[in-house]
Amino acid sequence: MNIVVYLKSLEFANAAFLWLLPIVVLLTAGYIWKKNRMYAVFSVSTETPFLGIKSAKQKFRHLPFILRMLAIIFVIIALARPQSSISHKQVDVEGIDIVMALDVSGSMMAMDFRPNRLDACKNVMQTFIENRSNDRIGLVVYSGEAYTKCPLTSDYQTLLRSLETVKFGIIDDGTAIGDGLGTAINRLRESQAKSKVIVLLSDGVNNAGHIDPYSAAEIAREFGIRVYTIGCGTIGNAPISTPYGIMYIKVEIDEPLLKNIAQKTGGKYFRAQNKTKLQEVYDEIDKMEKTRITEYHFTNKPDEFFPFLLVALGLFLVEILLRYTILRIKP
């Protein structure tokens, strides 16, 4: 381990002992002052005759003192009880399984949303998917009948590619809300997720399919699936492009049905009259259905004073050895 990184990772249990470090500065200053008082001063015309006569003993005469100061520094650090901090984090993620049921009937071509309802919904749903994490999301499309466009997956890129290919005319026209809801329930009925959610969007009245929407809502409740329903479209008439030019269709949304489905399953009904409102609806659902993440932190702080104490002892022994052998001063 890099020594700098190691030192930065240390914490001190008895940090007050570090205030003893200035003692080393005082001892050093006293040593220098004392040595200066020991030498006599005399003047010579040139120092040439004295060059090169310094012995190794003279050159290293201060080494014992330096070693002792270093030993004191390491002793003080050891007294401060350095500790390394080892942290562990365990994260429990409780993901959510979400199925988005999208109406692709002919009325979704209406241009009260720009460029039309379907493309506006696809764009908002894309943003919703991109903002999620740790969840599995699936996609069901329905019109006169329903089918699974993408099963539950955490591979959001695959899901987004499936959403991108959704278009008009891929299935018979009509509005089979019961079939759309039933197909979405089928994708979730074996889910082990703690939270199971369906986001069902419709712009019309149930007029096709084989499954009664009210019965489908009862089944969703039995499986513990929460359904958020969205009524998509303005109030009144909406322009739609036809081979004969722009025509206006009456906006008919079965709000009582969508409200009943949401209420029965513990969800909520929303009405989106433009793309901005639709974005706000998905944002609100995103906030309500957040993945639950629980974090457990474990911290272990083993003492690291022994290496510092060992270094201090080594320095002290080397200092004693030098002082009484090689650098011994004769009386």
Image: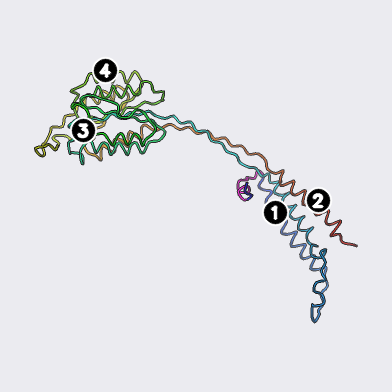
**In percent of the image, x 73 and y 54: which residue is there?**
70
- Amino acid residing under circle 1: Leu
Foreground label between 3 and 1: 3
Task: Find the magenta span and give its range.
Answer: 4-13
Q: Give the number of callouts.
A: 4
Q: Secondary structure at mark 4?
A: helix
Residue at the extreme right of the image, as rendered:
331
Residue that label 4 marks? 215
Classify 10 Å Cα crowding around label 4: few (below 14), some (14-19), many (20 and above).
Answer: some
Which of disc 4 and disc 2 is earlier in sequence? Answer: 4
Is 211 or 219 nearer to us in this picture?
211
Task: Report which quarter residue 169 is drawn in.
Answer: top left
Q: Is residue 7 magenta?
A: yes
Q: CA distance from mark 4 to mark 3?
A: 27 Å
Residue receiving disc 3: 168
Query: What is the crowding at mark 1: few (fewer than 14 residues within 10 Å), some, or many (at least 20)?
Result: some
* Residue 65 location, quadrant: bottom right
Quadrant where the C terminus is found in the figure: bottom right
For disc 1, the marked residue is: 21
Q: Earlier in the sequence, mark 1 or mark 2?
A: 1
